[in-house]
Image: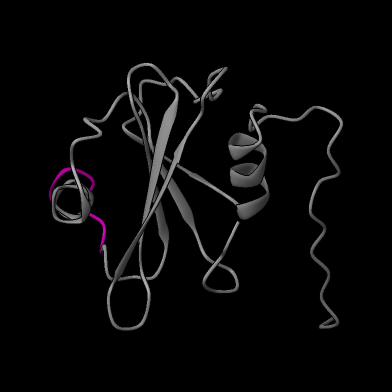
Amino acid sequence: MFFPAQNLKVYIALGTTDMRKAIDGLSIIVSEKFNLDPFSGHLFAFCNRKQNIVKILYWGRNGFCLWHKRLEKDRFQWPRSKQEIMTIGSQELTWLMDGLSIHQKKAHKMLKYSTIF
């Protein structure tokens, strides 16, 4: 999977999204429903009701990009929550696109060190 920037945020829209929406419709959801900036360069992921299609929207320097994946078999393990949007990391997005849950019990946690004392 292509990740356009280092340290990017991945926002996943929980619930279902009408997959007939393209760049304009999805960017309106990002800005009006979620109060986020679609031009931020972060990834915004959406899933359909059947959980077999995911679209990822992002701004790439001079235009929007829309990544679309449709599964021929199986379903994405799209998280369910009462929230409208969830922030995850690029590793969790990779798991999600591979058909895994974003909550991997045996995954190593990210460690952050500082040399400042």
Q: Quadrant of the N terminus?
A: bottom right
Q: How far across and how far down the image is residue 76, in percent? A: 53, 25
**Residue 61 position (above or below residue 85):** below
Name the residue at 38% across, 16% down. 50
Left or right: 115 as drawn, with respect to 79? right
Name the residue at 26% across, 30% down. 17
Name the residue at 39% across, 70% down. 41
Residue 61 figure quarter = bottom left
The stretch of residues the image draws in magenta is 32-37
Q: How far across and how far down the image is residue 23, in percent? A: 21, 55
Q: How far across and how far down the image is residue 59, in percent? A: 33, 70
Question: Does the magenta-highlighted stretch encompass residue 33?
Answer: yes
**Residue 79 position (above or below residue 89):** above
**Residue at the front extreme of this rendering:** 72
* Depth check, front residue: 58 or 66: 66
* Depth check, front residue: 77 or 72: 72
Q: How far across and how far down the image is residue 13, in percent? A: 35, 37
Main secondary structure found in the magenta portion = loop
**Residue 80 position (above or below residue 106):** above
Question: Does the magenta-highlighted stretch encompass residue 86?
Answer: no
